[in-house]
Image (cartoon, helix red, strand yellow):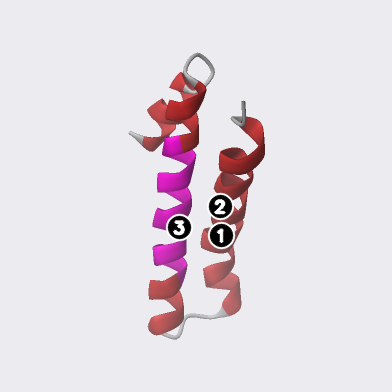
Amino acid sequence: MGACGLLAGKQVPWLGQLAAAGLALLMLLGAGVRIRIKDSFLKTLPALGYMALNTYLCVAAFHS
């Protein structure tokens, strides 16, 4: 659903911004779980990277 929301954001910017914010929150929580179960930094890095990407999309790409 998040990916569909990002694609729909090309036509409806607020929807893309909402989807990006939701995905960023999801990745933040995912990184938190990785940290809590004491995974290595390399295993946590993808969640942090996707969180940063979606935060950027939320703030800059769909900003109208």
In the image, which disc is placed on residue 50?
2
- Tell me residue 46's x, y (percent): 56, 60
Q: Mark 1 points at which residue?
A: 46
Mark 2 lies on a secondary structure that is helix
Q: Please, what is the dominant secondary structure of the magenta stretch?
A: helix
Disc 3 residue crowd, few under 14, some 14–19, many 20+, Cα 10 Å: many
Residue placed farthest to the left in the image?
1
For the residues bearing labels 2 and 3, Cβ distance under 8 angstroms: yes
Mark sitting earlier along the chain (2/3): 3
In the image, which disc is placed on residue 27?
3
Rendered position, 32 above or below 14 = below
* Amino acid type for the residue under numbered disc 1: Pro
For the residues bearing labels 1 and 2, Cβ distance under 8 angstroms: yes
Magenta region: 18-31
Measured in 3D between alpha carbons, the distance from the residue under mark 2 to the one under mark 3, in whole angstroms, is 7 Å
The label nearer to you, 1 versus 2, is: 2
